[in-house]
Image (tube, rainbow, N blue to C red):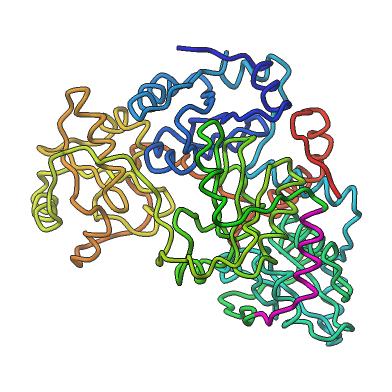
Amino acid sequence: MSVRTTAWVREQLTAGREIALVDLREEGVFAEAHPLFAASLPLSTLELEILDRIPRKDVAIVLYDNGEGLVARATKALDALGYSKVSALEGGLDGWRAAGGEIFRDVNTPSKAFGELVESVRHTPSLSAQELKSLLDTRADVVVLDARRFDEYETMNIPGSISVPGGELVYRVGALAPRRDTTVIVNCAGRTRSLIGTQSLVNAGIANKVYALRNGTIGWTLAGQTLEHGAARRAPQAPQDADTAVQARALADRAGVKRIALNELPTLLYDQARTTYRFDVRTPEEYAAGHLPGFRSAPGGQLVQETDVFAPVRGARIVLGDDTGIRADMTGSWLAQMNWQVFVLDADAKTSATETGPWKPRRPPLPQVETLAPAELDDLVRSAHATVFDLSPSAAFAKAHISGAWFAIRAELRDALNAAPRSAITVLTSPDGALARYAAGDLAAEGVAVHVLDGGNAAWRSAGLPVEGGIARAASAPTDRYRRPYEGTDNPASAMQAYLDWEFGLVEQLARDGTHGFRVL
């Protein structure tokens, strides 16, 4: 197995060469410690994500774990999928640390660190939760815009706020604050999306006074104020605004965003020496109604927030599509400042938006395995002749799973099989059955025979068969997901404050790391 040193990886990152530094551990473990530009791509879900997240088969991929033995297994899998330049990080995570590499924590860390850098350079205007509460109580002329995804907004929000995901802010603010005297407040759960959203409005030359809600819903909660739940207020359709479009384009140009016509795109894609990501930055609803072939849905605000998820190949090119250009230009202006090479489709491509429906990930062919129909499995479970292992994310398993099933993590499946009572037949399942098929293929190669629920949990639910909640039966520890201190409504105040303290220190960590190449206009 080829081995790469920490120094080599840092050199590639600093020089802007294409590289994917991949952490194969579960997300919950990844969030505890990792290099800045490491992408969480667990061995457990490798086949479900790899083709879209790392599309070029001969890009430099450097894998690491922390002594769990995941690298050898992933190398074998990637070799079978045709990836030709796969290496291991010398010494794994401990090797990175021993070589002096900076260690970060949490998730989406590059974007969060960049947001803190923006605030430190531009002194993004903000106000406290107490100040906002006073404005709302006195019925001041203010509008509060929540820059998170709509599902996050539905869970909890500042009372009276309106859902406007970050990439939509500049595009839609005119319809929400048509009077120049209206003060615009932007919030998220913590800091990043409110800071980037507020600075987007400032950079675009919006005439209104604009402020970020300092520390978002965390700050609101720590101030002893209550949140609203289940709200459904959304921004209206934006009117065409030629002035805003001009401002957004000028900003993107100043950031170094390049223009490309639709008929020039094939030439860019033909360059097999570069990775080119294509993203449609409109809302998921607009994307589903019609989009360009080959473009993935990546709403602009989330793309900036989750660059490590959407584009784990650092140094790659990014092409952005939009119908008016405003959202692509604003998104592109931030990505360019984060040291990405960005292109925006220069012409309205509506007439070429020939594909419809939600984005569907690409997957390798499913292995041939022994399957059971839902009714067959139900009979076996009722007669205690089958033990079911569910490879779903732990949060989905806790919400609902086949009655009697055991939670298991795919990368730890061999140990999980030994941790639970065994029946005559062992059955694997997963949300749609795909991950269970890949896992069954692994086991078959090792001489272990299992069956797979045909159609997975979706088919079981469609058949109206019994489910239960909770994680009473766990054959693996639920380390597959990191519980964000800013999500949900039951986080300890100490965890929320610790998260804010960590964010405040990110600018200093960036300086120590030295590989980012960020710049702030």
Relative to 330, does residue 268 appear above or below in the rendering?
Answer: above
Left or right: 164, with 25 as reference point: right
The residue at 60%/33% (across/down) is: 38
Q: Position of residue 492 (x, y in %)?
A: 66, 54
Classify the position of the N terminus by image quarter.
top left
The residue at 75%/29% (across/down) is: 515
The residue at 26%/49% (across/down) is: 433
Number of labels in the image equals 0
Q: Position of residue 318 (x, y in %)?
A: 61, 46
Between 118 and 107, the residue placed more toward the observer is 118
Q: Position of residue 217 (x, y in %)?
A: 71, 64
Between 202 and 468, the residue placed more toward the observer is 202
Between 117 and 31, the residue placed more toward the observer is 117
Relative to 194, does residue 510 appear above or below in the rendering?
Answer: above
Q: Position of residue 7 (x, y in %)?
A: 69, 16
Left or right: 492, with 201 as reference point: left
Q: Main secondary structure of the magenta part?
A: helix
Check residue 217 for magenta coloring: no
Relative to 7, does residue 368 appear above or below in the rendering?
Answer: below
Relative to 330, does residue 236 appear above or below in the rendering?
Answer: below
The residue at 67%/64% (across/down) is: 327
Span colored in magenta: 238-253
Left or right: 192, with 483 as reference point: right
Check residue 249 for magenta coloring: yes
Left or right: 398, with 86 as reference point: left
Quadrant in the rendering for residue 47: top left
